[in-house]
Amino acid sequence: MPSFDTVCEPNMVEVKNAVENTAKEIGTRFDFKGTSAGIEIKEKEISLLGDAEFQLEQVLDILVAKMAKRNVDVRFLDKGDVQKMGGDKVKQVVKVRDGIATEDAKKIQKLIKESKIKVQAAIQGDAVRVSGTKRDDLQAAMALIRKEMVELPLGFNNFRD
């Protein structure tokens, strides 16, 4: 039976490269000289450091530009709150989304059921497997998911015929 998996997986190599390029640009930019502006990545968390919220926004803008240049969808970034550190320094943690959250998976499953396309959706961990008898129905389901779930950077893999 033909099927495919709907997933939300960033290319972590490209994300790390974008963070490294951002750190390099922060080190060379004149407006960041002598400040505590910086960026670092650990696992799936990117920490932005700066002297003020304005500086954090600048660092985030550079990161977004570098990720866009590397074809990484910026919807993978989940910004956290700005936290005050010692002195006048601030920090913001940006999480990199990986996997479809349970409530989003349920939305996708409900969307497919209500569409009357002859396919079935099953939640499998942090992915949603869609299976059906016809390849055309699966392609219609892909188009529907892309159209309706614009807030998630979804991808499709394991397409089996």
Image (spheres, helix red, strand yellow):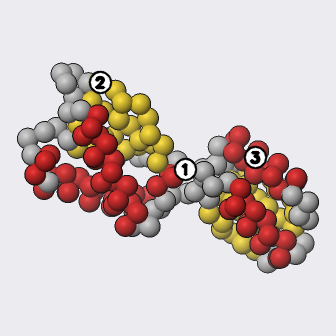
Instruction: Pinpoint residue 101: horizontal percent, then vertical percent.
Output: 65, 43
Query: Between 111 and 93, which is closer to the camera in this rendering?
Result: 111
Instruction: Identify the residue at horizontal 38%, vertical 37% (top origin).
Output: 93
Which residue, as the protein is rendered here, is positioned at the far top? 87
Question: Which residue is at the front of the view, 53 or 34?
Answer: 53
**Can residue 39 be seen here?**
yes
Looking at numbered disc 2 in the image, what kind of residue is underneath it? Lys
Q: If you read the primary sequence from the N terminus, does the residue marked by circle 1 or circle 2 appear first?
A: 2
Q: CA distance from mark 3 to mark 1?
A: 17 Å
Mark in the foreground, 3 or 1: 3
Q: Residue 46 appears at what percent x and percent y?
A: 37, 44
Q: How many marks?
A: 3
Q: Read off the residue under disc 1.
A: 98
Write the residue at 64% across / 48% down: 100
Instruction: Say the numbered circle drawn on residue 84.
Output: 2
| Quarter location, residue 127 | bottom right
Q: Quadrant of residue 69?
A: bottom left
User: Label 3 vs label 2: CA separation?
Assistant: 36 Å
Dot 1: few (<14), some (14–19), or many (≥20) neighbours within 10 Å?
some
Q: Nearer the viewer, residue 141 or 3?
A: 141
Residue for badge 3: 107
The residue type indicated by label 1 comes to Asp
Label placed on residue 134: none
- Residue at position x 76%, y 45% in the image: 106
